[in-house]
């Protein structure tokens, strides 16, 4: 499954954003779920961030974790949508499959890491009437309005080359193995060359720890 810097889905004048990531977790307490308001000339709405601990020592069930996220995102927080609008059932079902596949892949791949923090980010936004047609033609503008900042070309080019990722390496962007060459970010996390370059061209934050790469002002 391909994981990028988040995906946008449009339903008339309503836009949904969905993203997920997993990072090694060493703290005792799982972060509280929280919301983030967004207002711009083009969009209004909010993000919701939901968290869960994946403890591989307890043989976790991906189905249980997936259902927990779906309940947090779409059932417990009905008031999350900032206007009278119901999230389509098809959208909710597809996101459930994404979450399950992602957790299942991580459970199978991480033999050396025992505690991981799963973060799921969901956003609902309403497009202002005067910018509706512009949004349909170019969702890159939406990324800019929400605050997704691409890393600078010079910082991407300066990433450390990794000549041998090792036989057990799995890129946490594409969740695939096999490629030996990669790129390492200043935070220490390594990824396939094409995966991290494409990611940073959209988002200057590390997919695992959210380390901020330099960006052009």
Image: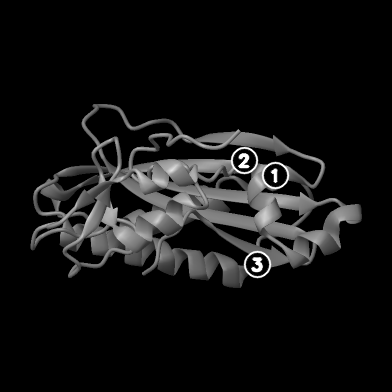
Cα separation between marks 1 and 3:
24 Å
Q: Is residue 70 above or below residue 81?
A: below
Q: In the rendering, at what x and y percent does residue 207 appear?
A: 38, 47
Which quadrant holds residue 166?
A: bottom left
Q: Residue at x 59, y 45 (%)?
A: 77
Answer whether residue 70 is visible to the viewer in this image.
yes
Q: Secondary structure at mark 2?
A: loop
Specify whether 150 is left or right of 212. right
- Disc 2, disc 1: CB below 8 Å? yes
In this rendered view, identify the residue nearer to me: 167 or 15: 167
Kindly identify which residue carries mark 3: 88
Q: Is disc 3 placed on a helix, strand or loop?
A: loop
In the rendered image of this protein, does residue 26 appear above or below residue 70? above
Residue 122: x percent and y percent?
55, 50
Q: Residues within 10 Å of mark 3 (few under 14, many from 20)?
A: few
Residue 79 visible in the picture:
no
Q: Residues within 10 Å of mark 1 (few under 14, many from 20)?
A: some
- Residue farthest bottom in this picture: 90
Are discs 3 and 2 less than 8 Å apart at CB?
A: no
Q: Tag 1's secondary structure?
A: helix
Question: Which is closer to the viewer, label 3 or label 2?
Answer: 2
- Between residue 157 and residue 86, name the one nearer to us: 157
Report the coloring of the rendering.
one colour
Report the disc number at residue 145.
Answer: 1
Separation of disc 3 and disc 2 at Cα? Answer: 25 Å
Q: Earlier in the sequence, mark 1 or mark 3?
A: 3
Residue at the spot 25% in from the left edge and 64% down from the top edge: 105
Is label 1 or label 3 in front?
Answer: 1
Look at mark 2 in the image and give the residue it sits on. Answer: 147
Question: Which of the image's four quarters has the C terminus?
Answer: top right
Percent position of residue 174, x then y: 33, 64
Give the left or right position of residue 25, taking residue 43 as reference: left
């Amino acid at each position: 499954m391909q994981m990028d810097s988040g995906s946008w889905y449009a339903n008339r004048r309503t836009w949904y954003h969905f993203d997920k990531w997993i990072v090694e977790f060493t703290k005792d307490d799982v972060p509280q779920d929280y919301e983030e308001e967004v207002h711009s000339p083009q969009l209004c709405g909010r993000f919701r961030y939901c968290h869960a601990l994946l403890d591989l020592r307890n043989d976790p069930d991906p189905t249980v974790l997936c259902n927990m996220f779906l309940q947090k995102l779409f059932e417990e927080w009905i008031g999350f949508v900032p206007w009278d609008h119901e999230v389509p059932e098809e959208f909710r079902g597809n996101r459930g499959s994404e979450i399950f596949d992602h957790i299942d892949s991580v459970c199978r791949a991480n033999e050396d890491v025992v505690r991981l923090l799963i973060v799921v980010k969901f956003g609902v936004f309403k497009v202002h009437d005067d910018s509706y047609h512009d949004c349909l033609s170019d969702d890159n503008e939406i990324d800019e309005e929400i605050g997704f900042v691409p890393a600078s070309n010079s910082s991407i080019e300066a990433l450390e080359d990794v000549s041998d990722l090792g036989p057990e390496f799995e890129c946490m962007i594409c969740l695939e193995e096999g490629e030996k060459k990669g790129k390492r970010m200043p935070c220490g996390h390594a990824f396939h060359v094409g995966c991290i370059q494409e990611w940073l061209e959209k988002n200057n934050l590390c997919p695992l720890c959210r380390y901020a790469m330099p960006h052009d002002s």
